[in-house]
């Protein structure tokens, strides 16, 4: 998923000084909502996880926030879930990383390779 024309992300698992940078943890229940804990350096998954959800959670490891939100619908007296179906960090089922995400990664990890916005 973290590929596009001109950009490709490869994840290499390694330890630094015997300390894991991030750990993958599989929850004990059959279902659950995947999440990343930055403070514990864990990617928490469950048995029913989809590959696209793993890609979304890796987006958090790379530093991207969720880009979905809820809005209040006065006419229905309830919250409505809002998302962009084309954006991986908004919708992991149909979304892809945005060009701006790749550009941010390049600026962060390869400074000087593309101009800053």
Image (tube, rainbow, N blue to C red):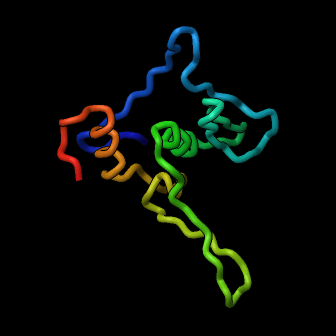
Q: Looking at the picture, tell me which residue is in the foreground, 3 or 43.
A: 43
In which quadrant will I find the N terminus?
Answer: top left
Q: Residue at x 18, y 46 (%)?
A: 115
Q: Can you give x and y, in whole percent of width and height, for residue 45 in the image? A: 67, 37
Q: Looking at the picture, tell me which residue is in the foreground, 67 or 11.
A: 67
Q: Looking at the picture, tell me which residue is in the foreground, 17 or 57.
A: 17
Q: Can you give x and y, in whole percent of width and height, for residue 47 in the image? A: 72, 37
Residue 8 sits above or below residue 75 on the image: above
View extreme (right): residue = 29
Q: Give the total of numbered labels.
A: 0
Q: Residue at x 61, y 39 (%)?
A: 36
Q: Residue at x 71, y 31 (%)?
A: 26
Residue 46 sits above or below residue 73 on the image: above
Image side of residue 35 versus residue 92, left or right: right
Q: Residue at x 50, y 13 (%)?
A: 16
Q: Quadrant of residue 114?
A: top left
View extreme (top): residue = 17
Q: Can you give x and y, in whole percent of width and height, for residue 9 in the image? A: 37, 33
Q: Can you give x and y, in whole percent of width and height, for residue 24 in the image? A: 63, 28
Image side of residue 114 versus residue 92, left or right: left
């Amino acid at each position: 998923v973290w590929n596009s024309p001109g950009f490709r992300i490869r994840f290499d698992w390694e330890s630094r000084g015997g300390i894991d940078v991030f750990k993958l943890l599989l929850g004990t229940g059959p279902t659950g909502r995947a999440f990343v804990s930055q403070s514990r350096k864990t990617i928490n998954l469950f048995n029913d996880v989809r590959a696209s959800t793993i890609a979304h959670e890796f987006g958090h490891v790379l530093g991207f926030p969720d880009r979905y939100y809820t809005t209040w619908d006065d006419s229905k007296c309830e919250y409505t879930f809002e998302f962009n179906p084309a954006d991986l960090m908004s919708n992991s089922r149909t979304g892809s990383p945005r060009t701006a995400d790749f550009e941010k990664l390049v600026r962060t990890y390869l400074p000087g390779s593309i101009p800053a916005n």
